[in-house]
């Protein structure tokens, strides 16, 4: 079946068309037929679409809202211009999978969208005011454009973390804030960590129950997830994505008292300080130059600029600290997996994060770590390392497509019975 995967951000829509079925998914042979992005929705949008074996399309066009963006995507998908194998009309798009950022405590797994699910997503808007409204707009637009007979599935970025025990998800603040306001750690990047856990299983040849790993998603946004017996056991992001690792522009963990102190000293509002912690901190904040790891790693820059060097060191130290903490929390792990733009592409960062972890049972093989080949998945630990280390390319779209496949296949089965 052909599955349209949509990821609606506040002013963008990303998509992929994935062709798959149960047997291809089992053999990891699903196929991405086309992908693209509409950015700067609400003004003169930037459109970039590409189909397998075709020259990419890039153009500017005024796009008012998410509905118009999705209309544009679908029109291109079915047009002869894109020439996508197996897609010549709307009816060749069999189902849609939506990435939905926040499922609150309500959604513990992916789900077929109906009116109740739409309401549930709307109920979580306060927890993700930038993302959930855009996700819901995407769902409604796709329903309208593709018709009621095309299944829509919501896949939540928080759902994988619904297995985290209370001892890890509760903040040690007065309990009534959890009861009344649902303030707790939810975790994000769940779709990515779930995909990593599933690929680890396949690569290591273990069952879900035997999967004990630490997944490090290191990109602009970064998080770590402790996966115990195939389930999320703890993760570094919390009530919002601000908590945890040092990120491109987010601070990660800080002492909350800093907020009051800055407000008092600088006359900044809480909203301004939170925005500073989200947008001007992390690698950008320390280096004062850029949030982009590749630019910081630039040999000249790192060797000549003390703060660029410091930003990278703080980033690596925090990641190493979480690995240590999760090893202690889980009572050990069998593997550490690196993913995301930085995790997949930077041998140097992987090396610097793992430095000194030998006594804990993790040593990288420097040749395998350097790799050089654009392999999507590989083992990078030394043969005698008790904890294995892998690089696995992130693929959230594929996890979403497989969730759609799982849910739509089971409805078909139920209908047949
Ligand atoms: P997002 O979280 O926006 O999806 P990505 O996962 O694409 O981000 O990661 C972006 C980050 O990956 C940037 O900091 C970028 O510099 C970094 N990156 C990409 N390639 C490399 C590389 N070869 N070496 C180091 N960092 C890299």
Image (tube, rainbow, N blue to C red):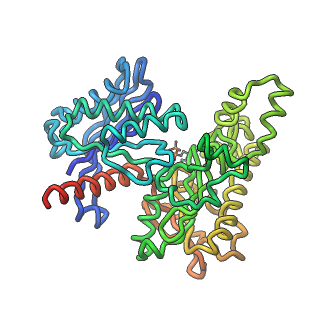
* 246 lies left or right of 397: right
Which residue is rendered at x = 35% and y = 53% of the image? 398
- Inspect this view and state whether residue 241 appears: no
> What percent of the width, then of the height, locates residue 340?
52, 52
- In this figure, what is the number of numbered marks? 0
Nearest to the observer: residue 204 or residue 405 = 405
Q: Quadrant of residue 97?
A: top left
> What percent of the width, then of the height, locates residue 363?
64, 73
Image quadrant holding the C terminus, namely bottom left
* 203 lies left or right of 338: left
- Inspect this view and state whether residue 307 appears: yes
Which residue is rendered at x = 64% and y = 59% of the image? 168
Which residue is rendered at x = 47% and y = 68% of the image? 230
Q: Quadrant of residue 49?
A: top left
> What percent of the width, then of the height, locates residue 221?
57, 45
> What percent of the width, then of the height, locates residue 60?
37, 21
Q: Residue furthest right?
A: 265
**Location of residue 132 with respect to 205 vertically, above or below:** above
Which residue is rendered at x = 69% and y = 66% of the image? 324
* 368 lies left or right of 171: left
Q: Residue furthest bottom?
A: 384
**Location of residue 4 with respect to 42 vertically, above or below:** below
**Location of residue 126 with respect to 305 vertically, above or below:** above
Nearest to the observer: residue 119 or residue 278 = 119
């Amino acid at each position: 079946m052909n599955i349209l995967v949509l990821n609606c951000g506040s002013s963008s829509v990303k998509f992929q068309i994935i062709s798959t079925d149960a047997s291809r998914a089992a053999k990891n042979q699903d196929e991405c037929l086309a992908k693209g992005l509409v950015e700067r929705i609400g003004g003169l949008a930037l459109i970039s679409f590409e189909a397998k074996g075709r020259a990419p399309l890039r153009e500017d066009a005024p796009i008012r809202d998410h509905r118009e963006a999705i209309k544009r995507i679908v029109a291109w998908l079915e047009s002869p211009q894109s020439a996508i194998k197996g897609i010549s009309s709307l009816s060749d798009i069999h189902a849609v999978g939506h990435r939905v950022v926040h499922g609150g405590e309500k959604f513990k797994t992916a789900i077929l969208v109906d009116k109740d699910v739409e309401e549930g997503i709307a109920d979580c808007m306060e927890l993700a005011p930038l993302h959930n409204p855009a996700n819901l707009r995407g769902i409604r637009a796709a329903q309208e454009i593709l018709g009621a007979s095309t299944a829509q599935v919501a896949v939540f970025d928080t759902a994988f973390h619904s297995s985290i025990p209370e001892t890890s998800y509760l903040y040690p603040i007065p309990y009534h804030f959890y009861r009344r306001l649902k303030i707790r750690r939810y975790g994000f990047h769940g779709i990515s960590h779930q995909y990593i856990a599933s690929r680890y299983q396949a690569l290591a040849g273990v069952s879900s129950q035997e999967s004990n790993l630490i997944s490090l998603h290191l990109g602009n946004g970064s998080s770590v997830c402790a996966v115990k017996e195939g389930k999320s056991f703890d993760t570094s992001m919390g009530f919002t994505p601000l908590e945890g690792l040092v990120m491109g522009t987010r601070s990660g963990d800080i002492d909350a008292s800093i907020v009051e102190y800055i407000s008092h000293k600088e006359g900044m509002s809480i909203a301004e300080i939170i925005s500073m912690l989200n947008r001007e901190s992390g690698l950008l904040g320390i280096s004062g130059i850029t949030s982009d790891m590749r630019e910081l790693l630039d040999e000249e820059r790192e060797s000549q600029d003390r703060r660029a060097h410091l930003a990278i060191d703080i980033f690596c130290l925090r990641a190493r600290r979480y690995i240590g903490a999760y090893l202690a929390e889980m009572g050990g792990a069998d593997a550490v997996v690196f993913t995301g733009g930085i995790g997949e592409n930077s041998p140097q960062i992987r090396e610097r994060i793992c430095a000194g972890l030998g006594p804990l049972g993790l040593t990288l093989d420097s040749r395998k770590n350097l790799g050089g080949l654009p392999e999507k998945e590989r083992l990078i630990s030394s043969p005698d390392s008790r904890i294995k280390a892998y690089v696995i390319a992130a693929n959230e779209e594929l996890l979403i497509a497989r969730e759609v496949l799982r849910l739509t296949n089971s409805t078909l089965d139920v209908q047949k019975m």
